[in-house]
């Protein structure tokens, strides 16, 4: 088991290294100059060169990449210019560190991964992401819960009423949900429920988790702003889960032990809820774990359209302002979460089915 876990962690490490390389080189060959964006279009060349030198963008690309990987790595080399217990990066206090080895001009230290600072606000990228990520995580959790509850319910009743009008209607809606792009669904749902039916629903087209009180009493949690983006984000997994539940239920209901339960005189409800559903949900749970990871990464368009102040807004805002450290940090952060979820899922599979550990 230890060898299996070690192999999965090693695969995850190489995936993150590959993503870091791709993200770095992609954003360093893109057209656009962050220094000019910071200084304005009328900035002179000397001022732009000074800013690029401060940002480290005047060095060869290979040197920049090694410096970037060194900042990202928890175990890294840094010059020891301070005798306190804090590490200074970009001439500012960053985090506590643990010295591992000391050399002539540098030290090997253990620290938190450093995602650098925003070009625009000069804040640490990690701080910006930690403010935005809880909102994205909440949106993903609520969307997944909505997709599971509604999707499993529709799948069960579709299986019980196979080939009925209800079954055909659910199939048509599932096909539409799987094919409908999220950005188009977001615009359509916002327009219909928050504009045309606003007097009846009381929902807003735009809004985040916190709203400003009209009487000057600060901010308050406004959960109604979560409804439309959660439904929009949950449509595609709902469609997949409903069809997966239906096919799994039909397969289980045809098994011998279900026929035996019927022959014993057990009620239909007891057979479905106690015997069939338990076995039918195994592939659904597997699919849900993968969909939850993708929801964290796929909420960009939905958050932007509904103005939900999560990772999507951070990424779009960073791209508009050429704030590359913020965008690169957000992408790496999301990829790290995806890799961790996949590693945990693989380990759980290995615990549940020992045959997987032999592969």
Image (tube, helix red, strand yellow):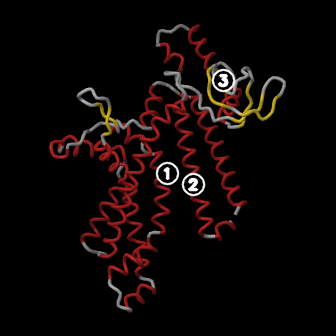
Q: CA distance from mark 1 to mark 3?
A: 34 Å
For this rendering, which residue is in front, 236 or 87?
Answer: 87
Query: Looking at the image, which residue is at 67% across and 47% down?
Result: 14
Q: Is residue 92 left or right of residue 147?
A: right
In the rendered image, which residue does mark 3 sit on? 88
Q: Residues within 10 Å of mark 1 (few under 14, many from 20)?
A: many
Q: Earlier in the sequence, mark 2 or mark 1?
A: 1
Q: Reply above or below: 63 against 240.
A: above
Residue pushed farthest left?
A: 199
Q: Residues within 10 Å of mark 2 (few under 14, many from 20)?
A: some
Label 1 SS: helix
Q: Which numbered disc covers residue 342?
A: 2
Q: CA distance from mark 2 to mark 1?
A: 8 Å
Q: Reply above or below: 151 against 28.
A: below
Query: Looking at the image, which residue is at 49% across and 51% down?
Result: 293
Q: Nearer the viewer, mark 3 or mark 2?
A: 3
For this rendering, which residue is in front, 171 or 336?
Answer: 336
On the image, the x and y values in percent for residue 284 come to: 45, 65
Check whether the beta carbons of the residues at disc 2 and disc 1 lie within 8 A of each other. yes
Residue pushed farthest right?
A: 104
In the rendered image, which residue does mark 1 sit on? 293
On the image, the x and y values in percent for residue 78 come to: 73, 27
Q: Earlier in the sequence, mark 1 or mark 3?
A: 3
Query: Looking at the image, which residue is at 67% across and 66% down?
Result: 357
Label 3 SS: strand
């Amino acid at each position: 088991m230890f060898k299996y876990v070690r192999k999965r962690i090693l695969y995850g490490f190489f995936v993150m290294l590959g993503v870091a390389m791709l993200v770095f080189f992609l954003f360093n060959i893109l057209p656009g100059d962050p220094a000019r964006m910071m200084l304005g279009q009328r900035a002179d060349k000397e001022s732009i060169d000074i800013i690029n030198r401060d940002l480290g963008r005047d060095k060869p690309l290979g040197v920049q990449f090694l410096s970037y990987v060194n900042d990202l790595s928890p175990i890294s080399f840094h010059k020891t210019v301070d005798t306190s217990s804090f590490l200074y990066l970009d001439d500012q206090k960053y985090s506590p560190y643990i010295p591992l080895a000391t050399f002539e001009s540098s030290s090997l230290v253990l620290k938190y991964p450093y995602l650098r600072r925003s070009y625009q606000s000069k804040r640490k990228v990690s701080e910006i992401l930690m403010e935005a990520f809880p909102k994205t995580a909440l949106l993903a959790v609520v969307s997944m819960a909505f997709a599971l509850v509604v999707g499993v319910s529709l799948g069960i009743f579709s299986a019980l009423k196979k080939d009925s009008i209800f079954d055909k209607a659910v199939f048509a809606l599932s096909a539409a949900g799987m094919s409908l792009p999220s950005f188009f669904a977001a615009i359509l749902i916002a327009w219909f429920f928050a504009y045309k039916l606003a007097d009846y629903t009381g929902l807003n087209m735009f809004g985040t988790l916190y709203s400003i009180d009209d009487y000057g009493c600060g901010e308050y949690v406004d959960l109604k702003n979560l409804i439309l983006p959660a439904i929009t984000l949950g449509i595609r997994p709902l469609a997949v889960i409903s069809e997966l539940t239906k096919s799994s239920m039909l397969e289980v209901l045809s098994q011998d032990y279900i026929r035996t339960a019927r022959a014993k005189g057990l009620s239909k409800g007891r057979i479905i809820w106690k015997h069939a559903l338990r076995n039918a949900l195994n592939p659904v749970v597997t699919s849900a774990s993968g969909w939850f990871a993708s929801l964290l990464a796929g909420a960009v368009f939905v958050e932007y359209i509904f103005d939900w102040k999560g990772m999507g807004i951070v990424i779009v805002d960073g791209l508009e302002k050429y704030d590359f450290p913020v965008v690169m940090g957000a992408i790496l952060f999301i990829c790290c979460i995806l890799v961790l979820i996949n590693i945990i899922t693989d380990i759980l599979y290995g615990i549940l089915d020992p045959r997987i550990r032999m592969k």
